[in-house]
Image: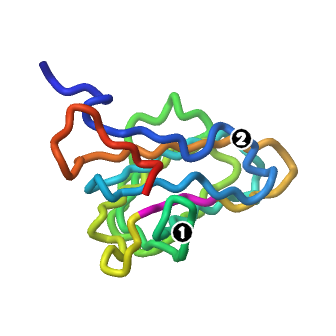
Amino acid sequence: MLPQLLDLFQIVSGNVPIDLGAGALTGDYVSLKNYHTCSILFFKDVGTTDEDTTLTLRQAKTVAGGSVKDLTFNRYGYKSGADLAAVGTFTRVTDNNAATLVLEGELQKIVIIEVPVREMDIANGFDCITLTTSDPGTTGADLGCFLYFLGSPRFDQSTLPSAIID
């Protein structure tokens, strides 16, 4: 039998669907101690022109958010448009070399940020990540949410280990 999604990934909610214009948000932290990769799936609805949302990736030493610092990521993909049902493929970026990504307010977006553990500051005890969103403004509702997909477990287990504990 081929592996299914639940066999391959530990999935954790970063933020439930929420009005991004309600203020800057920090998502829940997840630990990559038991995983080699994490993909963050961010999804947002159409907002207002010139009220862009900035995503920032951060790393920490604990799932409580201890000793936080920005985490540069290089690889992400996105679908963008007024109607995502009409967008067939992801645009891939492999040279971002920044901790932030700005999303146009007037477009729907699906963004997947790839985080290999090897790009984290593991030597100094950083093994947790979070995604934050800026406040795009209050003109109109700009709904968004994101999920963490932790994959490539370090140890072979029938049940994937939790990512919300240190």
The label nearer to you, 1 versus 2, is 2
Residues at discs 1 and 2 in contact (Cβ within 8 Å): no
Q: Residue at x 70, y 58 (%)?
A: 52
150 versus 60 height, above or below:
above
Image x and y of residue 148, in percent: 45, 46
Magenta-colored span: 128-132
Q: How many marks?
A: 2
Image x and y of residue 9, in percent: 32, 38
Q: Secondary structure at mark 1?
A: strand
Checking the image for residue 131, the label placed there is none
| 156 sits left or right of 41 in the view | left
**On-image quarter of the N terminus:** top left
| 46 sits left or right of 7 in the view | right
Q: Main structural element of the magenta stretch: helix, strand or loop?
A: strand
Q: Residue at x 15, y 23 (%)?
A: 2
The foreground one among 87 and 75 is: 75
Q: Residue at x 54, y 68 (%)?
A: 100
Was residue 129 drawn as part of the magenta stretch in this picture?
yes
Q: Residue furthest front?
A: 166
- Amino acid type of the residue that numbered disc 2 sits on in the rendered structure: Ile
The quadrant where residue 132 appears? bottom right
The quadrant where residue 131 appears? bottom right
Was residue 32 drawn as part of the magenta stretch in this picture?
no
The foreground one among 126 and 166 is: 166
Q: Secondary structure at mark 2?
A: strand
Q: Residue at x 46, y 54 (%)?
A: 30
The foreground one among 63 and 57 is: 63
Please name the residue that numbered disc 2 is placed on.
18
Q: Residue furthest right?
A: 139
Please name the residue that numbered disc 1 is placed on.
100
- Amino acid type of the residue that numbered disc 1 sits on in the rendered structure: Thr
Label 2: how many Cα within 10 Å (few below 14, some 14–19, many 20+): some
